Amino acid sequence: MEDDFGTELDTAEQAAEQADEPLDSSLAPTAKPGEGYIVLAATPIGNMGDASARLIAWLEGADIVAAEDTRRLHRLVTSLGIKVGGQIISYHEHNEATKTGELLTQVQSGKTLVMVTDAGMPSVSDPGFRLVSAAVEAGVKVTAAPGPSAVLTALALSGLPTDRFCFEGFLPRKSGERASRLHDLAVEKRTMVFFEAPHRLEAMLRALHTAFGPARHGAVCREMTKTYEEVIRKPLSGLLEWAETTQIRGEIAIVVGGAPDSDPITPEQQVAAVNALIAQGMRLKEAVAVIAHDEHVSKRELYSAVLAARGK
């Protein structure tokens, strides 16, 4: 892939030279007079040194800055030694529904709006999606000042395959819903990236251990890009043991390897899979229905096998 990309870049440079036009190195795209647009600007996930020149230029020059947390925005610009040039508006998950239309109207009137979140790329497990969706529908221009990403940083640091991956964000907090989601993901072949709060990490790793098995490889990435950055790479059994004996703090991302190729599970394993779902909060009939559907077996026969294994 790197060789292909390098070839494409060389071709682009050659084409630019032939046209006597240098590659674009401007901090902002050229806009027509009176044409408003939205900029999704990535902010550092920990280290202020990761702030891009384009992020700084946008913050200083935008008409409006929509921030997930205005206090964090203030700390960011103070750390960078800059000032926000335009109006600052609070824009978060609790007011997206009411603020989106108002912001879109401002942009349609010709203003430049920069969207920033607490850390990383807006709209990726953060506010911003609703605004982008509305902008696309209205034909409003949307661009990005890309930069730090907790998802990609964790993936790169994990040591797990990166050629195919998926981002699953935060798992459901309720044990039954979480078990159902993880059951679906147990056969996922791609590397998976999750987020979790420190105080819920042990419970999450236990659920992963139950759903994926103790041997599946994973990585817990903590405080990425910060002074106390730490990456623990172990099978899920080892990660769970580590979490049980460690006081965990800071921002957390968890990366888990995809499912290995395997043969259909045996009837005994089907019963064990049902019991594992029950242990995570599912009712018996619901757990039987899930496993029977996935393994293409009779619900009645599987239900009877579960009861027989219990001696009933």
Image: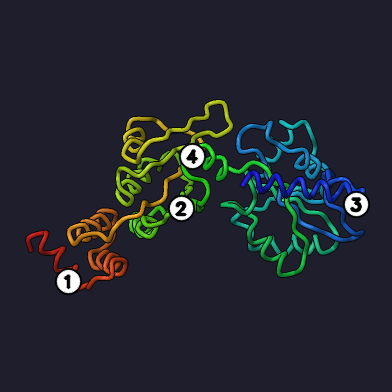
Marks 4/1: CA distance? 42 Å
Which mark is on residue 190?
Answer: 2
Nearer the observer: mark 1 or 2; the answer is 2
In the displayed structure image, the side of residue 72 where residue 105 appears, left or right? right
Which mark is on residue 126?
Answer: none
Q: Earlier in the sequence, mark 3 or mark 4?
A: 3
Q: Amino acid at mark 2?
A: Arg
Q: Secondary structure at mark 1?
A: helix
The residue at which mark 3 appears reads as: 19
Nearer the observer: mark 4 or 1; the answer is 1
* Mark 2 surroundings: few (<14), some (14-19) or many (≥20) residues within 10 A: some
- Give x and y (percent) for residue 258: 41, 50
Which mark is on residue 301?
Answer: 1
Look at 38% across and 36% down and name the residue there: 234
Marks 3/2: CA distance? 42 Å
Look at 74% across and 47% down and name the residue there: 9
Q: Earlier in the sequence, mark 1 or mark 2?
A: 2
Which mark is on residue 252?
Answer: 4
